[in-house]
Image (cartoon, rainbow, N blue to C red):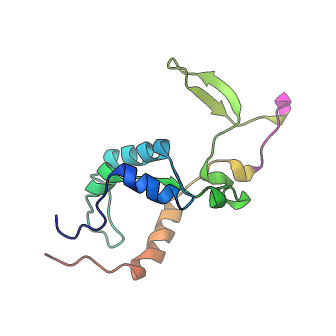
Amino acid sequence: GWHHVEVHSNEWWIRKYESYGFKYDIELTEKAKAIARSTKKDYKGPHGQYLDGFYVRVTLMVFVNPVVAALPEHAHLFPELGCFKSREENGLIIHRKCDPANGESEPDPNMYPLELSDQMDEDWLEWLRPRVAPPKSF
Protein backbone atom coordinates (compact mmCIF):
# COMPACT_ATOMS: atom_id res chain seq x y z
CA GLY A 1 0.00 0.00 0.00
CA TRP A 2 0.87 3.67 -0.11
CA HIS A 3 2.98 5.15 2.68
CA HIS A 4 3.35 1.99 4.77
CA VAL A 5 6.28 2.13 7.13
CA GLU A 6 7.71 -0.78 9.13
CA VAL A 7 5.18 -3.46 8.14
CA HIS A 8 5.92 -6.53 10.28
CA SER A 9 4.09 -9.36 12.01
CA ASN A 10 2.68 -8.89 15.50
CA GLU A 11 5.30 -11.31 16.83
CA TRP A 12 8.06 -9.10 15.42
CA TRP A 13 6.61 -5.98 17.11
CA ILE A 14 6.18 -7.82 20.41
CA ARG A 15 9.79 -9.01 20.37
CA LYS A 16 11.01 -5.55 19.38
CA TYR A 17 9.19 -3.62 22.11
CA GLU A 18 9.69 -6.24 24.80
CA SER A 19 13.43 -5.94 24.11
CA TYR A 20 13.03 -2.28 25.18
CA GLY A 21 11.33 -3.32 28.43
CA PHE A 22 7.72 -2.80 27.35
CA LYS A 23 5.14 -5.53 27.93
CA TYR A 24 2.52 -6.41 25.33
CA ASP A 25 -0.97 -6.33 26.87
CA ILE A 26 -3.42 -8.46 24.89
CA GLU A 27 -6.35 -7.57 27.17
CA LEU A 28 -5.87 -3.80 26.74
CA THR A 29 -5.27 -4.36 23.02
CA GLU A 30 -8.59 -6.19 22.61
CA LYS A 31 -10.48 -3.64 24.73
CA ALA A 32 -9.08 -0.74 22.69
CA LYS A 33 -9.90 -2.47 19.39
CA ALA A 34 -13.45 -3.18 20.62
CA ILE A 35 -13.93 0.49 21.51
CA ALA A 36 -12.58 1.49 18.08
CA ARG A 37 -14.98 -0.94 16.37
CA SER A 38 -18.02 0.19 18.36
CA THR A 39 -17.34 3.90 17.76
CA LYS A 40 -16.00 3.76 14.20
CA LYS A 41 -18.79 5.94 12.77
CA ASP A 42 -18.54 8.53 15.56
CA TYR A 43 -14.87 9.48 15.59
CA LYS A 44 -13.87 12.95 14.48
CA GLY A 45 -10.33 14.26 14.35
CA PRO A 46 -9.19 17.45 16.07
CA HIS A 47 -10.40 19.55 13.13
CA GLY A 48 -13.84 17.93 13.02
CA GLN A 49 -13.24 15.71 10.00
CA TYR A 50 -14.33 12.06 10.03
CA LEU A 51 -11.45 9.65 10.56
CA ASP A 52 -12.09 6.01 9.76
CA GLY A 53 -9.41 4.50 11.99
CA PHE A 54 -9.34 1.18 10.09
CA TYR A 55 -5.82 0.33 11.17
CA VAL A 56 -6.62 1.06 14.80
CA ARG A 57 -9.50 -1.41 14.68
CA VAL A 58 -7.42 -4.05 12.91
CA THR A 59 -3.72 -3.72 13.82
CA LEU A 60 -3.53 -1.77 17.10
CA MET A 61 -1.24 -3.25 19.75
CA VAL A 62 -0.99 -1.88 23.29
CA PHE A 63 2.35 -1.99 25.09
CA VAL A 64 2.84 -0.93 28.71
CA ASN A 65 6.04 0.51 30.13
CA PRO A 66 6.12 -1.17 33.56
CA VAL A 67 8.59 1.36 34.96
CA VAL A 68 6.23 4.25 34.21
CA ALA A 69 3.06 2.31 35.07
CA ALA A 70 4.48 1.52 38.53
CA LEU A 71 4.81 5.20 39.48
CA PRO A 72 2.24 6.28 42.10
CA GLU A 73 0.95 9.11 39.89
CA HIS A 74 -0.10 6.50 37.32
CA ALA A 75 -2.05 4.25 39.71
CA HIS A 76 -5.27 5.16 37.85
CA LEU A 77 -4.00 3.53 34.63
CA PHE A 78 -5.02 0.04 35.81
CA PRO A 79 -8.10 0.79 37.86
CA GLU A 80 -10.25 -1.79 39.52
CA LEU A 81 -12.45 -1.24 42.52
CA GLY A 82 -11.23 -3.46 45.32
CA CYS A 83 -14.18 -5.14 47.05
CA PHE A 84 -16.29 -8.06 45.88
CA LYS A 85 -19.82 -7.19 44.73
CA SER A 86 -20.99 -10.24 42.79
CA ARG A 87 -20.04 -12.81 40.22
CA GLU A 88 -21.49 -12.98 36.71
CA GLU A 89 -22.73 -16.26 35.23
CA ASN A 90 -19.45 -16.62 33.32
CA GLY A 91 -17.50 -16.36 36.58
CA LEU A 92 -16.32 -12.78 36.07
CA ILE A 93 -16.06 -10.95 39.40
CA ILE A 94 -17.82 -7.58 39.67
CA HIS A 95 -16.10 -5.16 42.03
CA ARG A 96 -17.38 -2.21 44.02
CA LYS A 97 -15.84 0.56 46.10
CA CYS A 98 -14.78 -0.64 49.52
CA ASP A 99 -16.74 0.83 52.45
CA PRO A 100 -14.95 1.60 55.74
CA ALA A 101 -18.36 1.41 57.48
CA ASN A 102 -18.27 -2.33 56.69
CA GLY A 103 -14.76 -2.70 58.14
CA GLU A 104 -13.21 -2.65 54.66
CA SER A 105 -10.02 -0.76 53.86
CA GLU A 106 -10.56 2.01 51.36
CA PRO A 107 -7.70 2.40 48.86
CA ASP A 108 -6.06 5.68 48.03
CA PRO A 109 -8.53 7.62 45.83
CA ASN A 110 -5.74 7.92 43.21
CA MET A 111 -6.23 4.19 42.59
CA TYR A 112 -9.82 4.68 41.44
CA PRO A 113 -10.66 4.79 37.74
CA LEU A 114 -10.05 8.19 36.20
CA GLU A 115 -13.43 9.78 35.52
CA LEU A 116 -13.38 11.54 32.17
CA SER A 117 -15.73 14.38 31.35
CA ASP A 118 -16.84 16.15 28.19
CA GLN A 119 -14.89 19.18 29.40
CA MET A 120 -11.71 17.12 29.66
CA ASP A 121 -12.24 15.95 26.06
CA GLU A 122 -12.78 19.52 24.89
CA ASP A 123 -9.70 20.74 26.78
CA TRP A 124 -7.65 17.99 25.10
CA LEU A 125 -8.95 18.95 21.63
CA GLU A 126 -8.28 22.63 22.33
CA TRP A 127 -4.68 21.74 23.20
CA LEU A 128 -4.34 19.40 20.21
CA ARG A 129 -5.88 21.48 17.37
CA PRO A 130 -3.07 24.00 16.94
CA ARG A 131 -0.51 21.17 16.99
CA VAL A 132 -2.11 19.03 14.26
CA ALA A 133 -2.26 20.16 10.67
CA PRO A 134 -5.69 19.98 9.02
CA PRO A 135 -5.98 17.11 6.53
CA LYS A 136 -5.08 17.76 2.91
CA SER A 137 -7.51 16.90 0.14
CA PHE A 138 -6.45 14.09 -2.17
Q: Residue furthest left?
A: 138
Query: What secondary structure do most residues of the magenta stretch adopt?
Result: loop
Identify which residue, 26 or 94, lies in the foreground. Answer: 26
- The quadrant in which residue 116 appears is bottom right
Q: Residue furthest top?
A: 89
Q: Give me the residue at 55% from left, 25% from top.
A: 92
Viewport quadrant of the C terminus: bottom left
How far across and down, in percent of the image, does residue 137 sit? 16, 77
Tell whether 117 sits left or right of 97. left
Tell me if residue 3 is in the magenta stretch. no
Q: Give me the residue at 72% from left, 53% from top.
A: 110
How far across and down, in percent of the image, does residue 135 sit? 25, 76
The span shown in magenta is: 101-108
Tell me if residue 102 is in the magenta stretch. yes
In the rendered image of this protein, does residue 31 appear above or below residue 137? above
In the rendered image of this protein, does residue 64 appear above or below residue 127? above
Identify which residue, 31 or 13, lies in the foreground. Answer: 13
